Image: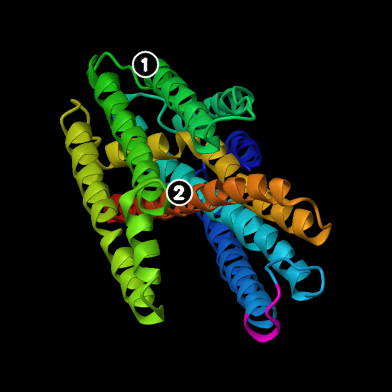
Amino acid sequence: MILVTCELLIFFFFFFPLSVPLLLVGYGFGASFVALFAQLGGGIYTKAADVGADLVGKVERGIPEDDPRNPAVIADLVGDNVGDCAARGADLFESIAAEIISAMILGGTMSKRCKIEGNLFPLVVHSFDLVISSIGVLSIRGTRKGNPMAVLQKGYSITIVLAVLTFGASTRWMLYTEQAPSAWFSFALCGLVGIITAYAFVWISKYYTDYKYEPVRSLALASSTGHGTNIIAGVSLGLESTALPVLIISVAIVSAFWLGQNSGLVGGLFGTAVATMGMLSTAGYVLTMDMFGPIADNAGGIVEMSQQPESVREITDVLDAVGNTTKATTKGFAIGSAALASFLLFSAYMDESDVIL
């Protein structure tokens, strides 16, 4: 996903240097258009199949989940791949495409004034992201004992550390200028703001969806008193979980703009672009965590349909619970990155409007 985006943008940059990056705005709109249908269509399909399978099996026939006698189970397993793999990949692809194009527009304007490589900087950053996400994935080693979420979290921590190092090196290499020798460090801090924002989103989503923490346990306790309290507690918990992400996004935008504005260059808006790059610098690994959910869910369905022993189903149930958490963290990550990317698109539009006027 990231590799194809970078290759296409590099192609356009070298063959149409005078028109880049304005010509690439259409590429970003195309990515958004595809993501709209993939996300909406895939999400509706997977939820309709899931609810339909549960209504027929559990409610009408009283048979277990993923029972082979329920043909809707196949649609449910397919829906996990359509909604949680293809749709989430399209969503993050759209965020990355919009962020790269917006950053190139803002960086191009600043490059003319400050003589830095602002155009190529987003491509260099995301090229490094491919490497560090691959290292993070390869660092994962499964064990028969222990919490699977802790194993995935360890890989994510390694990816975060590598992202900080490569981001700092990229800013020093591409954004150093004698006009403001310390400006690259300010932009590196903008990237650090984005990386911290990504980690915060993942942690918040994990807190509100992991069975080890209080929100899920309180919701399970509310379920024991009836359907009404379960619905009320679930809705209130969902509304509560949006408060911290909104505050974090607001603080991140203001902080990145301030750091860019005080870098010694005219780079307030470019600072927010760099922060968005930092947030998306671990997108490859986060998408891998998202894929873990459908794989574990489908494995549980296969175990049930093939009538494996109960001990096998217990193992897949633990993996499925962790997979639901990782899917939720990816949703939070994708929405947060999309919010920053949409802010960048409006900023790039205003920047180009000022140049034309």
> Label 1, label 2: how many angstroms apart (C-alpha)?
31 Å
Q: Up-down: is 229 above or below 267?
A: below
Q: Up-down: is 219 above or below 195?
A: below
Q: Amino acid at mark 2?
A: Thr
Quarter of the image with the C terminus is bottom left
Which secondary structure class fits the magenta region best? Answer: helix
Q: Is residue 180 magenta?
A: no
Extreme bottom residue here? 60
Q: Nearer the viewer, residue 279 or 350?
A: 279
In the image, which residues are magenta? Answer: 59-63
Q: Nearer the viewer, residue 35 or 138?
A: 138
Task: Name the residue: 40% across, 30% down.
Answer: 118
What residue sits right under mark 2 in the picture? 329
Please tell me in which quadrant of the rendered image residue 90 appears: bottom right
Q: Is residue 149 left or right of residue 15?
A: left
The spot of residue 310 in percent (x, y) is 71, 52
Q: Up-down: is 315 above or below 263?
A: below
What residue sits right under mark 1 in the picture? 172
Q: Dot 1 surroundings within 10 Å: few (below 14), some, or many (20 or more)? A: some
Q: Is residue 231 left or right of residue 96?
A: left
The spot of residue 86 in percent (x, y) is 65, 56
